[in-house]
Image (tube, grey):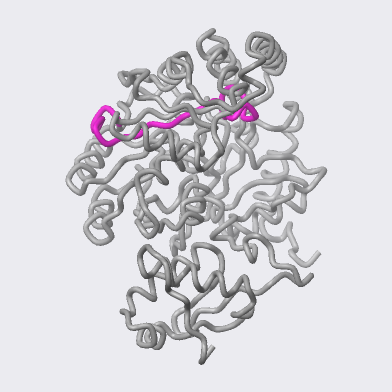
Amino acid sequence: MTTWLPDLTGSGPLYQRLADSIETDIDRGVIDFGAKLPPQRDLAYDIGTTVGTVGRAYQLLRERGLVSGEVGRGTYVLAQHADGKKSDLHVRDVGMEGTRTVDVPRGKLRFDSTAAPDVGQGAIVADFLSRTAQDYPHEISSYTRDFPDRWHDAGARWLSRNAFAPTAEAIVPTLGTHAAVMAAIAALTTPGDYVAFEHLTYSQISRSAGLIGRRAALVASDEEGIDPDDFERVCAQKHPKMIFLMPTAKNPTLVTLSASRREAVARIAREYNVVLIEDDLYGHLTDDPTPLLAEYAPERTIVAAGLSKSVAAGLRGGWLACPPAYRHRIRVAHKMMTGGMPFLLAEVNSRLVLSGQAAEIRMRSIAEIQARIAIVRDTLAGFSFKSHDNVPFVWLTLPDPWLSGTFKNACLEHGVLIDDEDEFKAGRSEQVFHGVRFGISQPSHYSDVAEGVAVIRRLLDEGRAGYDSFT
């Protein structure tokens, strides 16, 4: 690496051009897998820039999953796979992919999903699909270029909760809640910008944001949710452009933020010009009366939700409501990020909502979730966990001496897939929570729910003596 220098031609920020040049040379084989990149100070001198610029480029490469680095050791290009082929992500990096396996092991009970339970919605969806295909054959055979008013009306109806009632003009139809949030991030930030997250959250947003060059700034939380004082500290020190929050029934801890904390977060966001992204996906399953963040800061809050947890995850139905100034940019970003809305799904989703069928399925899903949560509460009585009558997952605090990853592996060995706490860490965090999350909506029958929770109970009762990682 002593004779290597990057090609910095092109436009854009220097740190981004430097990161792109290094990535290109890794792909071309100019820089070998396992090679140590030049020390930041040396490279800064060679190309005539600051150490901070080189450090920012190296950080961007880490977020892309291309390199790893530790203080005192340097920055290394991540190794290729044993078969000699380089994967799309160059390595299975927990910071990029999370802790779940790419291919789900067969023959295991799926307690690692919180999609809507099967309550017979397939027959209803099939009818809507058939009628849509008959009514709009031309639209199905072509690309979707115009969004009819009914799609926005459906989003306005679905996102309305408590006193929050967005107008149709504020709505952007999306391919699910995840796509809605990512479209907002892509539209309203640029590579290198910070997006703030709580240490534990729906971390696939932070990983996805990393793939497009955004950096994660972590904000502390306690048993009551995000700490407004720490949010203000992060705003003052790192100047994030956005913050992603799940104020109601947060995944994975089920914390619901109090009205006073929501008011404080809104005040701080306004003071530091931070856009608020409010993921209300699980909020729609609850009957929580706390005002949405959007009611405290409507001029800077984007609310996103969809059908995946209460109607049908396979429909990829979602919407966001945003201030009018953001709408066009977000809609364009969503098209660029996803390829655009398919007419068939958007039309079926809007018909489900406007007909009232989506709300009916949601009520049936809630009843099913309540019955399954009752099984959990009965089986795990005496242990520390958080649950909500209407929300399809449980946050279990592990007793000594269990570690989160070890308990997840023990459950896997006994035929149950759950998620450890690292799956929900939005970035490199030193905080340890000793918790796991498991969902109860995907097993087919109550007997499967009972069987899986019984495995969890048995492992808790037996302690580490009931699990040998070498077997």
Q: Position of residue 188 (x, y in %)?
A: 35, 44
Q: Is residue 9 left or right of residue 435?
A: left
Q: Residue at x 61, y 32 (%)?
A: 115
For the magenta stretch, what is the residue range? Answer: 294-316
**Which of the two residues, 100 or 68, is positioned nearer the viewer here?**
68
Against 375, residue 233 (above or below) is: below
Q: Is residue 71 left or right of residue 49?
A: right
Which corner quadrant holds the C terminus? Answer: bottom right
Q: Position of residue 44 (x, y in %)?
A: 36, 83
Q: Position of residue 354 (x, y in %)?
A: 50, 10
Q: Residue at x 57, y 36 (%)?
A: 393
Report if residue 389 is visible in the image.
no
**Which of the two residues, 352 or 133, is positioned nearer the viewer here?**
133
Report if residue 366 is visible in the image.
yes
Q: Residue at x 60, y 58 (%)?
A: 402
**Which of the two residues, 248 or 20, is positioned nearer the viewer here?**
20
Q: Residue at x 59, y 37 (%)?
A: 381
Residue located farthest toward the left when viewing the structure as drawn:
271
Q: Is residue 103 left or right of residue 117?
A: right
Q: Is residue 414 left or right of residue 42?
A: right
Membership of 299 in magenta stretch: yes
Quadrant of the image occupied by residue 454: top right
Residue located farthest toward the front when viewing the structure as drawn:
10
Q: Position of residue 158 (x, y in %)?
A: 45, 19
